[in-house]
Image: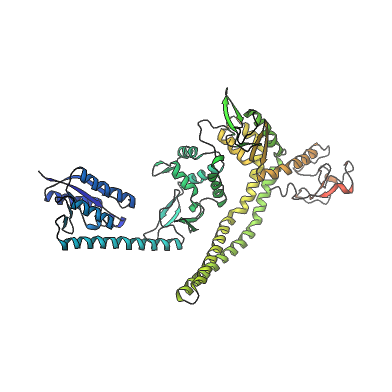
Amino acid sequence: MSIKSIIYARVSSKEQEDTGYSLDAQEKLLKEYAEKNGFTVAKIFRVSESASGRQIRKTFNEMIQYAEKHHIPIILCEKIDRLTRNLKDAASVSDWINENSDRQVHFVKESFVVNKNTRAHENLVWDMKVAIARFYTNNLSEEVRKGQKEKLAQGWLPTKPPLGYKTIGEKGHKTHIIDEEIAPLVRRMFELYATGNYSLNALVDKMHKEGLRKNGKKVGKSRLHVQLKDPFYIGKNQWKGDVTQGMHEPMISKELFDVVQTRLNRTNDNPQYKKHLPVFKAKVKCEECGGVIAWEIQKGHWYGHCNHYRECTQNKYVRQEAVEEQLFRYFDKVALKNTRVLEWLEKAIRESHEEEIGYNTAKREEFSRIIRTADQRIENAYRDKLDGEMPATLCEKMIRESTKEKDEAIEALGKLSKGRTAYYEAGYAIHTLAAHAETIYKSPKATEDQKRLLLSHVFSNLTLNADRISPNYTFGFEFLAEWVPKLNLIFELAESSPTKGKEDAFASSHPTLLRRQDSNLRPRDYMCSSCFQDAWTISSPSHECIRSEALRPLAGPTPLRDSL
C-alpha cells in the first residue's frame, strides 16, 4: 500500500505569485514528487499571498491536526521557508516528528528530509535554515514598515483605499484617485446618514437598492460603519491610530463628515430599523424629561407618547396629524408670500458670484504662498537635522508646526473654490425650500423618508409637552423666521396700496415721489418702526406714522439685500 501524504503550498507575496512560485506551480511540483516516491496525496493545504498572519497560523495548525487525526506520516513542502518562518512553528513541526519515527517532512527543492532519526548535523542545518527564514521575515517586516512610513510622509496611504477610490500607477509610484462610478453612491451614503433619518441597518438596505456594492456583494453593516468613520474621505490618511494630511482628492466636505461622526456617536438619537418607520421616529423629545417620544400605530394612525424616562409625568398620547397641523404654522412663518422676491434673489446670486472672482483669486494666491513656504521650511529642517546643524528636537518642532500650518492652508484652499459661491446658492435654496415646505410635506407623492429629510432641514429639534409641539429652527430657518414676516408685511402693504407701481416687480408704491431714483430698485436701509413700511413710502402724506422717531435704521442686515 502507498503511504499517505499532505501537500503544503504557500506564497507570501504577489511577486512570488508572478515569478514562477505560484500555488499551482508548487502543487504541480509536489504532486510529481509524491507520484515518483509512491506517496498518495490525501489533502492539499494552500496559503495565498493575501492571507493574514492569523490565517497562515490557522491553516498551519489545521494541517498538523489533520495529519495527527488521520495518521498521515508525510508532509511535502517546496522549501523550509514555505513551511515555517518562526521558531514556534518550527518547534511544532519538531514535536510532531519526534512523536513517531515514521513521520517525515520533505523539502523537495532543497532535497532535504527531516525525521526523528535525522543526524545531528542535519538538525543543525534545519535549525539554521529556520533561523535564516525567521531573519528574512523580520528583515522584510522592517523594510515594509520603513516603506510605509515613507509613503505616509509623501501623503499617500500605504494600502488599498476605501470604497469610492481606486489605485493607479506602477509599483513604488501608486496613488489613489476617486472612482467616478462608485463615488456618487458613497457621497449619497454620507448625505443620507447625516440627515439622522437612517439607522445603519436601514442605510445598508437603502444603499444596496441604489447600487452600492463591494466586490459585487452587499456592503454589510460593520463595513459601512468603518467607511463612515474613515477620514480618508476628507483628504486625510489614518494609519495605526495616527491621522495625517493626504495628497489625494477629498470626496466629501469636512462639515458633512463631522455631522456624520456626531450622528455615529449619538446612538440613542439614531432611529432603530423598522419595516414601517413613522415620520417623527427619534425626532421628538419629551419637554419634561428629555426622553425620545415613542410612536405606535393604532387603527391606522400613529400616536406618540413619552415612555416616562426619569419619572416623567406626561401621560397624554398625541396623534401624528395633530403634530403636523401645529408644524404647518411654523412652515408658513418662514415662507415668502411674494414669489417675485425669489426672482430677485436669483439675480442677486449671479451678480454676487461675479464679485467673488477677485476675492477668490487673491485668497488662493495667499494660501498657495503659505503652502510653498511651509514646504521650504520642512525641507530645510530635514536637511539641518541630517547635517547636524540644528538640534534634532528643534528641527522636529519646526517640522510639526510647518506641517500643521500647511495642512490648515490646504484645507482652506479646498473650501475656497466653492465655499463662498455655495453660501449664496444655499441661501437661495433655503428661501425656495421655505416657500414650498408645506406643499412638499402635504404632497401625496411624498414618502416618509422625504418628510423626515424635510423636517431635518427645517427644525434642529422638536419637543413635546402634553399635546403641544415646540420646535426650534435650524440656523438658516431661524434667520428666516426673524425677517420673512417683516418682508411679507412690507410687500403685502405695497400690493394693497391703491397707487402701487405697475412697471417693476419692486417699484415703489409712490414712484412720483422718487424722481431721482436709479433703475436698480432695492429696499433702503431705513424702515418705519411702527408699520414696517420702507423709506420710500413713509414720506407719503397718507402715511399714518409720520414722525421723526418712527424712521430708524434697521438693526442688522436689510431684509432683501442681506437675506442670503
Which is more toward the observer, 390 or 252?
A: 390
Residue 162: percent from left, percent from top: 44, 50
Residue 87: percent from left, percent from top: 27, 58
Is 250 on the left or on the right of 461, as rendered? Answer: left
Q: Quadrant of residue 296?
A: top right
Residue 49: percent from left, percent from top: 31, 53
Which is more toward the observer, 387 or 545?
A: 387
Q: Is residue 85 visible?
A: no
Using the image, determine if residue 277 lies above or below residue 460: above
Using the image, determine if residue 156 lies above or below residue 482: below
Judged from this view, the residue extending furthest toward the top is 299
How many numbered discs sit on the rendered protein? 0
Which is more toward the observer, 366 or 350?
A: 366
Q: Can residue 339 be seen in this view?
A: yes
Judged from this view, the residue extending furthest toward the bottom is 389
Q: Quadrant of residue 221?
A: top left
Q: Quadrant of the N terminus?
A: top left
Is 51 on the left or on the right of 244, as rendered? Answer: left
Residue 308: percent from left, percent from top: 61, 33
Q: Quadrant of residue 213?
A: top left
Using the image, determine if residue 139 lies above or below residue 220: below
Residue at (58% x, 63% y) in the render: 367
Q: According to the image, what is the colour scheme of the structure?
A: rainbow
Residue at (28% x, 60% y) in the render: 134
Is 441 on the left or on the right of 238, as rendered? Answer: right
Residue at (54% x, 61% y) in the render: 407
